[in-house]
Image (cartoon, rainbow, N blue to C red):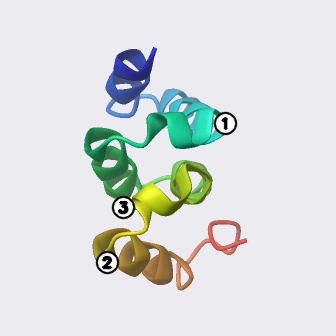
Amino acid sequence: VITALLNALRDADADVRWVASDALGTIGDQTSTQEVITALVNCLQDEVGNVRRAACYALVKIGEKAATHEVITALLNALRDEDGDVCR
């Protein structure tokens, strides 16, 4: 399941990327591999606000294992996102 969700994060359809990010957040700390965390950090740069918001949610739900300098910096940058829904 995780591999399929990782592949979906790279889909051309923003809705697919959004649902995949959201699903990884719902699964939470069970997805706490470096590959998943890196993919979600990359999603914080997505062109679509819903994808960025879901990636923030997922990283928070993964919890302590995602609390690296890179992730914290990316989440702090997300607080300044142009889309107000991203930083909620």
Which residue position is annotated with label 2?
A: 69
**What amino acid is at disc 3?**
Gln
Packing grade of label 1 (10 A; few <14, some 14-19, many >=20) is some
Dot 2 or dot 1, earlier in sequence: 1
- Look at the numbered disc 3 and give the secondary structure of its residue: loop
Q: Is residue 84 above or below residue 54?
A: below
Dot 1 or dot 3, earlier in sequence: 1
Q: Residue at x 53, y 48 (%)?
A: 51
Left or right: 21 with respect to 34?
A: right
Residue contact at pointers 2 and 3, CB within 8 angstroms: no
Classify the position of the C terminus by image quarter: bottom right
**What amino acid is at disc 1?**
Thr
Q: Is residue 43 above or below residue 44?
A: above
Q: Residue at x 34, y 70 (%)?
A: 68
- Look at the numbered disc 1 and give the secondary structure of its residue: helix
Which residue position is annotated with label 1?
A: 26
**What amino acid is at disc 2?**
His
Residue 87 or residue 25, whichever sits in front: 25
Left or right: 85 with respect to 9?
A: right
Residue contact at pointers 2 and 1, CB within 8 angstroms: no
Q: Is residue 33 above or below residue 67?
A: above
Residue 15 or residue 71, whichever sits in front: 71
Which residue position is annotated with label 3?
A: 45
